Image: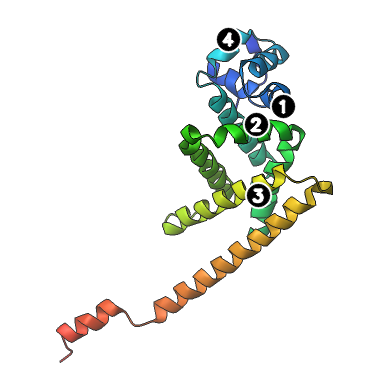
Amino acid sequence: MTDQTIPPAEMTLDELRVALAPLIPGHAVFDGWNDAALAMAANELGVPADRAKLAFPGGAMEMIDAWFDAIDLAMAKAFPPERIATMKIRARIRDLLLYRIEVTHPHKEALRRAFAILSMPQNALAAAKLAWRAADRMWRLAGDRASDFNHYSKRGILSALYTSTLLVYLDDDTPDIAATKGFLDRRIDDVMRFEKFKAQWKGGSERMPSLSRFLGRLRYPAV
């Protein structure tokens, strides 16, 4: 995180990238994710546009990446361990995901423009990585410490849920994004039922006869 006590003119490019990230979407709403929006954000921060451009050599994709990273940082601040500890797992995931949507709400059109860029074929891999990173950070904040296959399955499911919920949100004009919240609640219910079934199946499978042990006994019968 950038030290806000550092004058913008003295920031490194990495620090400048962090400082500009939350400012760009306010201008991307009108100008798109381009040099014009970056120049406006640079002017707001008080740095030359040419220097700001050096912080984002990858252009629009790097600006979007930095914005999403800024959302992650804000999310971590909003959900400290003591807050998370009071919540059930379902509420943790729901509230973390909704928080991400709510903080982007003032810049909904910027998010729509970002999705248009992310949906381009050449950006498919980068888009998938951003969704995975968001899911990973949500699960980590939620307290997940899985290191086996569950680590990957949980993040795969959540990244798909996050992406689909954002798509619903972009077309949602209901008061207080009620349609988005309803969609999210239904999908989380589906995920929780799946996790319950998986746990039951795993528990049942542990009590089932082991095929390898059975075949071993056939080969080496007890005497």
Q: Earlier in the sequence, mark 1 or mark 3?
A: 1
Amino acid carrying label 2: it is Arg
Residue under numbered circle 2: 113
Q: Nearer the viewer, mark 4 or mark 1?
A: 1
How was this image coloured?
Answer: rainbow
Amino acid carrying label 1: it is Val
The answer to whether one can see residue 82 in this image is no
Residue under numbered circle 4: 51
Residue under numbered circle 1: 29
Q: CA distance from mark 3 to mark 2?
A: 16 Å
Q: Earlier in the sequence, mark 1 or mark 2?
A: 1
Q: Residues within 10 Å of mark 3 (few under 14, many from 20)?
A: many
> Which secondary structure, mark 4?
helix
Q: Earlier in the sequence, mark 4 or mark 2?
A: 4
Residue under numbered circle 3: 165
The answer to whether one can see residue 84 in this image is yes
